[in-house]
Amino acid sequence: MNILVTGGGGFLGQALCRGLVERGHRVRSFNRGRYPELDVLGVEQVRGDLADPDAMLAAAAGCEAIFHNAAKAGAWGSYDSYFQPNVVGTRNVIAACRAHGIARLVYTSTPSVTHRATHPVEGGTAEEVPYGEHLKAPYAATKLIAEQEVLAANSVTLATIALRPRLIWGVGDNQLLPRLVERARAGRLALVGNGCNLVDTTYVDNAAQAHFDAFEHLQAGAACAGKAYFISNGEPRAMERVVNDLLRAAGAPEVHRHIPFALAYGVGATMETLWPLLRRRDEPPMTRFLAEQLVTPHWYSMAPALGDFGYMPRVTMDEGLARVAAYWRNAA
């Protein structure tokens, strides 16, 4: 089958491309840049901007399914800088599906669409946990709009599904763990609150597997069509343990310094005010949204994903950590 992956050059995107190629599909990736890793896989690369409808339409020509994984992520930036790729880009993907008669759309969403300040989520499903309100982070706010529009687009001619993998990590991560390691080695890392809040995470191969499982079951009228699902390893652990397990795997110093949530939240608010005044283009080390995320329990039920499309994590946390440790040792 001919399959388009948006954002195939990213961390999860490369895992999706690799897995689809291994399954015998012909894969095309729509990216802003070019990635040698995709050339090695034999993935066709098309460069363009998600917010450009003509570019998206051309990239989807001849494809029979789309894995829409591309998005602007992060905790900082103007609302429009997120709205264009995340909302307008998703609208362009849906329009391309309709224009070309593409029957399946697997969308990579995020649990952040359900964020509600410090309200805990403990074992909930997507049907039980409501969407967030008054979201402070443009990433979460725009992904919420995009997810709703993807699910609303589900029909007898286009089957859609939204997957919400929680905190993806693993071999090849060039964002989360490298930043943790850098801050830990510089002595600039602290835990917010007591670090005992339970959180879910997702090893990258499991996140990709969930997409493949959903894709194989997705069709008009399927149990999973038009629905959203939380995805994780299903092994909630204390935030302090998660952070230190990752740091230890990378050979970095563990962190045991804690700061109160009120202080972190206040620092985040101050930085959000100062960054534009100082014309800073980098991401502040703390925001109000990040402080809330770091202190709140977030773990989810995998039962709907198992029941509707057979998703079961294949790589345990401990196995994933062993793989990460070997990767960092070899890279040293």
Image (spheres, rainbow, N blue to C red):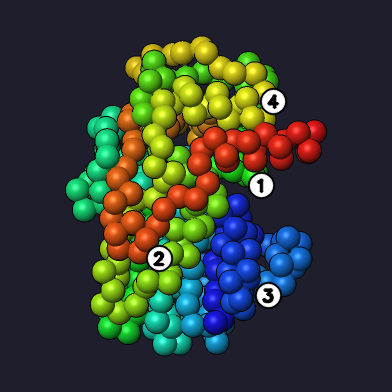
- Tell me the residue at 40%/82% (across/down): 103
Q: Is residue 119 left or right of residue 5?
A: left
CA separation, marks 1 and 2? 23 Å
156 in relation to 303, above or below: below
Tell me the residue at 59%/58% (across/down).
Answer: 15
To which residue does mark 4 refer?
251
Label annotation for residue 298: none
Q: Is residue 173 above or below residue 31?
A: above
Left or right side of 304 for 247: right
The nearer-to-camera label among 4 and 3 is 4
Kindly report the distance in space between the C-alpha atoms of the residues bearing marks 4 and 2: 35 Å
Where residue 31 sits in the image (x, y, percent)? 62, 65
User: Which quadrant of the structure image shows residue 174?
Assistant: top right
**Amino acid on which disc 2 is placed:** Ala
**Where does label 1 land, which residue?**
172
Checking the image for residue 214, the label placed there is: 2
Nearer to the camera, 70 or 128: 128
Q: Image quarter for residue 59?
A: bottom right
- Give me the residue at 62% from left, 21% from top: 184
Q: Nearer the viewer, mark 1 or mark 2?
A: 2
Residue 216 visible in the displayed image: yes
Q: Toward the viewer: 5 or 242?
A: 242
